[in-house]
Structures are given as C-alpha cells and as structure tokens.
Amino acid sequence: MLQEDRKNLKEKTEDIKRAIDSLREELEAIDYYTQRADATNNEELRKIFLHNAKEEKEHSAMLLEWIRQNDKGFSKELEKYLFNKERNIVNLEKKEQN
C-alpha cells in the first residue's frame, strides 16, 4: 500500500517499494512452507514444502541483492551486518558508536 500519492513518487522509489513488497511476500512464503513441513506427517509432502521454501529463499536473495544494488543506504547497512565474522550482531552497532 502506498503511503503517498503515486504522482509524488519517483520511479525509483516505486521500484524499490515493489521489490520490498515482493521480498516480504517471499519471506512469508518461506515461513508458511516451513511451518507446513513441520506440521505434516507425510514425508513426501514435507519434502515438497521444504523444496518450495528453498526456492523462495533463492527469490528472496535475488530481491535483496537488487535492493542492495539500487539503494545506497540499504547497501551500507547490509555491508556492515551481512557475512560479518562478529557473532554478536549488537556488538557491531556498539563498535560503530564508539
């Protein structure tokens, strides 16, 4: 849902919104499939749900990378937090504040 009138938005803002909306939908799908895999007693169905969740993770990663490439502020935060060897994520923020 747009918070502002579409005529006041830049095309890039709308594209980033589309990507964020799609990312949210993919993450929700991962959650749904994972819950269903946990809940079923049917092994074949469980495997299908887990396969589907894996596909949604791929889609999520693709969208996240697109967002990173197109939003400098988001890119900066991802570079700080993703794949960092510091195990305590909160420590990264504390180190930056000092």
Image: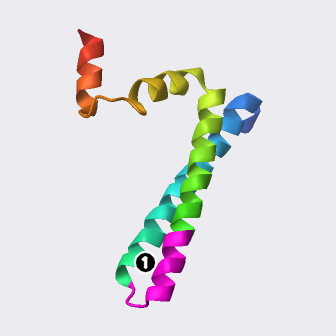
Q: Per the image, is 90 magenta?
A: no
> Residue at 53% across / 52% down in the picture?
24
- Residue 58 in the image, given as x and y percentages of width and height: 59, 54
Q: Front-most of 19 and 82?
A: 82
> Residue at 49% across / 63% down in the picture?
30
Label 1: few (<14), some (14–19) or many (≥20) C-alpha neighbours in 10 Å: some
Horizontally, residue 84 falls left or right of residue 75, namely left
Q: Per the image, is 46 magenta?
A: yes
- Residue 43 in the image, given as x and y percentages of width and height: 44, 87
Horizontally, residue 81 falls left or right of residue 76, namely left
Magenta stretch, residue numbers: 40-51
Q: Front-most of 45 and 9?
A: 45
Q: Is residue 82 visible?
A: yes
User: What sort of colour scheme is used for the picture?
Assistant: rainbow
- Residue 29 in the image, given as x and y percentages of width and height: 52, 64
> Residue at 46% across / 81% down in the picture?
46
View extreme (bottom): residue: 42
> Circle 1 sits in a helix, a strand or a loop, which is it?
helix
Q: Front-most of 62 and 9?
A: 62
Assign the magenta stretch its main secondary structure: helix
Task: Give the residue pinned by disc 1.
Answer: 36
Name the quadrant containing residue 51: bottom right
Q: Taking 25 as reference, is 36 above or below it?
A: below
Q: Taking 87 as reference, is 18 above or below it?
A: below
Quadrant containing the C terminus in the rendered view: top left
Name the quadrant containing residue 80: top left
> Residue at 71% across / 38% down in the picture?
15
Q: Taking 35 as reference, is 81 above or below it?
A: above
